[in-house]
Amino acid sequence: MPFEIIRNDITKVHVDAIVNAANSSLLGGGGVDGAIHKAAGPELLEECKALGGCRVGEAKITSGYNLPAKYIIHTVGPIWEGGNWDEEKLLYDCYRSSLELAKKYNLESMAFPLISSGSFGYPKDRALNTAISSIGSFLMENDMMVYLVVYDKKAFQLSEKLFNSIEEFIDDRYSEDHRLYRTTSRQDAVLREYDLEETVSFDRPVKKTKRSLEKVVKNRGESFSQMLLRLIDEKGLVDSQVYKRANIDRRHFSKIRNDVDYKPSKATAVAFAIALELNLDQTRDLLLSAGFALSHSYKFDLIIEFFIQDGNYNIFEINEALFAFDQTTLGA
């Protein structure tokens, strides 16, 4: 199952388990820890007293009590001390330990806060990278619906270098595309309307007839489903590799495989292009089979182009950037 970043109050998320960024005593504190204890009710504290605390990087589980979640998984993140005291490994272990505990209890869905990014002082961009890395690695091997819950924009921070690089990429190509649009929009309109078997002159009226419906149907190429399945075979991949890399649920993929005329959303089509590590031309072909295109007029499309040109096909990192720019994320 996929991974999704959402804005919400973690105490109100309906999942099998939420994760509490606790302190080592497990007896409550401030921030997310205090909010979870308050929402769960006094019975949570009584159960936590019997657990004997928790070491940094490890996790323990309790009932959810008054929360929508059935369980609470408590994990203790590292305090940031400059990055030279195994903070990254310990934070990675927090996510992995929590996920493994959820797997042990056969849970199908869980929600994390951004661990250690509050009073423990872990830089938000680094905390985010570690969360994405640990959760993403687990989901490549396991099926579970995982949410990373951020309360507001201040709690979510893409690395400044990456954010600025994407912003510059968008600014350059967005303005470039609009300059091109002003000079070619009339020609494009004509080319879209008329058959292209002969050269079209823009210095005289166009007298060609429109394409017939019969001709359009006859010349129809591969459907999205057909092209996707062919590409999977050509890449020598198996279905599970592809839908996991695409951040797509297995049941969703099954619908695509069994319906030759399946019509995906644009985000789903792009997700599979990323999963298959297609170059820009191949991505455009796959999108075209579903009736879509990449345009420099949209931030979403430009961010996708940025990552493809950079050779970065990690869908979780791409979603991290899409979320930071308030765009639709891939998969899920």
Image (tube, rainbow, N blue to C red):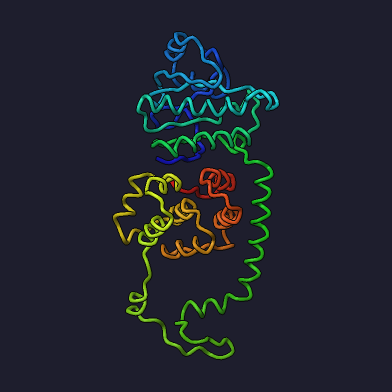
x, y percent for residue 58: 51, 20
- Residue at image x 63%, y 33%? 124
Q: Residue furthest front?
A: 236
- In the image, taking residue 229 as reference, residue 303 lies left or right, namely right
The residue located at (53%, 23%) in the rendering is 21
Residue 141 in picture, x, y percent from top left: 42, 37
Is residue 332 at all visible to an observer of this figure? no
Q: Position of residue 98 (x, y in %)?
A: 47, 26
- Tell which of 87 and 296 is nearer to you: 87
Of all residues shown, which one is farthest toward the right?
82
Residue 126: image quadrant is top right
Tag count: 0
Closer to the camera, 47 or 59?
59
Quadrant of image for the C terminus: top left
Question: Please, which residue is most extreme toward the left here?
Answer: 258
Q: Is residue 287 above or below residue 115?
A: below
Quadrant of the drawing holding the N terminus: top left
Position above or below: 124 against 81: below
Q: Is residue 34 above or below residue 224?
A: above
Dividing the picture into quarters, in which one does residue 226 lie?
Answer: bottom left
Which residue is at the front of the view, 100 or 51?
A: 100
Q: Is residue 115 above or below residue 187?
A: above
Q: Residue at x 29, y 55 (%)?
A: 258
x, y percentage for residue 298? 56, 59
Using the rendered image of the protein, determine whether residue 131 is visible from the camera's viewpoint. yes
Q: Which quadrant holds residue 213? A: bottom left
